[in-house]
């Protein structure tokens, strides 16, 4: 399968714990995006990378959130001191930087904070 | 800030009926994308419309991009239970470092009853 992959698919944690999610984009794609989606709503942008550079962060991304893409390939999203309001689906997407680009999404990581 | 409004939010119909989902904005988009998402999975791209007035067909699904590139519609003919899911429209932000970041509508939850 050469699509976007995410790991883990599901994560249950207790409030206050740290969690880390991984995203592996399509291999030749140089742009990588993170979105958050709550039940029955559309995804909301969190942050994106062009190669290893993080170019933009949403206001939704509090200081407890950090994302990295160290070698311009896979990316990690870490949430520190999780809160119940962090419960959501975290989606990763990748694209090839061309005009009118198309983003391809991974299956997501479903986070539940108890 | 570019916003996309989808309507209706919920649609419950019988197999064989036709339906239309609308995606509207006050902003011009360079393109609009339609995704379908099943529970627990990431959005899957259905189509990208690029040119004002463009019509694209995907089997029983017909997508239209408004002449002014501010709105789009998805029409499904003879809906089937397999069409059940969350339908999302999305458009890329234009300009600066936000280029390519997707803004999503809130989605339309479609249920097709056998």
Image: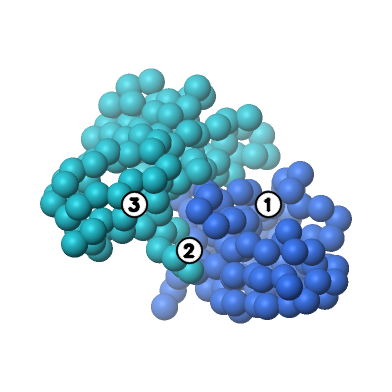
**Hue of chain A?**
blue
Front residue of this view, candidates B95 and B86: B86
Residue A23, how many percent across, how many down?
61, 70
Question: Residue B42 — which label?
Answer: 2
Marks 1 & 2, CB-CB < 8 Å contact: no
* Residue A30, above or below A26: above
Q: Secondary structure at mark 3?
A: strand
Instruction: Identify the residue shown where x is 40% and y is 36%.
Output: B7
Q: How many marks?
A: 3
Q: Tell me which residue sits at (20%, 52%) in the image.
A: B14
Going 84% across and 60% down the picture, which residue do you hit? A64
Q: Which residue does the numbered mark 1 point to in the structure image?
A: A46
x 55%, y 57%: residue: A39
B34 sits left or right of A50 in the view: left
Give me the C-alpha separation between circle 1 and circle 2. Answer: 16 Å
Viewed as shown, does residue A54 lie left or right of B102?
right
Q: Which mark is residue B110?
A: 3
| Residue B45 seen by the camera | no
**Chain of residue at mark 3:** B
Locate the N terminus of chain A and report the quarter of the image it occupies: bottom left
Can residue A91 be seen? yes
Q: Could you tell me which quadrant the C terminus of chain A lies in?
A: bottom right
Do discs 3 and 2 belong to a common subunit? yes
Question: In this figure, which colouring scheme has been used for the structure?
Answer: by chain
Quadrant assignment, res B97: top right
Chain that bears disc 1 = A
* Chain bearing mark 2: B
Residue B74 vs A70, above or below: the answer is above
Find chain B in the image and tell me its colour.
cyan
Q: Nearer the viewer, residue A17 or A26?
A: A17
Q: Are marks 1 and 2 on the same chain?
A: no
Residue A110 placed where, x, y %? Answer: 59, 70
């Amino acid at each position: 399968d050469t699509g976007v992959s995410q790991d883990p698919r599901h994560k249950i944690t207790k409030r206050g714990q740290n969690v880390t999610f991984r995203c592996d984009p399509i291999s030749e794609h140089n742009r990588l995006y993170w979105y958050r989606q709550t039940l029955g709503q559309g995804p909301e942008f969190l942050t994106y990378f062009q190669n290893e550079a993080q170019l933009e962060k949403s206001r939704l991304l509090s200081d407890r959130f950090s994302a990295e893409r160290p070698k311009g390939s896979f990316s990690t999203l870490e949430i520190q001191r999780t809160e119940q309001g962090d419960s959501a689906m975290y989606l990763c997407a990748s694209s090839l930087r061309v005009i009118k680009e198309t983003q391809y999404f991974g299956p997501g990581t479903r986070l539940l904070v108890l | 800030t570019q916003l996309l409004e989808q309507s209706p939010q919920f649609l419950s119909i019988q197999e064989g009926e036709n339906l239309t989902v609308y995606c509207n904005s006050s902003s011009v988009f360079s393109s609009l994308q339609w995704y379908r998402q099943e529970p627990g999975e990431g959005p899957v791209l259905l189509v990208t419309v690029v040119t004002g007035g463009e019509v694209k067909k995907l089997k029983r699904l017909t997508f239209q991009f408004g002449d002014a590139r501010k709105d789009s519609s998805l029409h499904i003919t003879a809906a089937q239970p397999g069409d059940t899911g969350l339908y999302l429209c999305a458009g890329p932000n234009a300009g600066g470092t936000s280029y390519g970041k997707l803004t999503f509508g809130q989605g339309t939850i479609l249920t097709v009853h056998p």
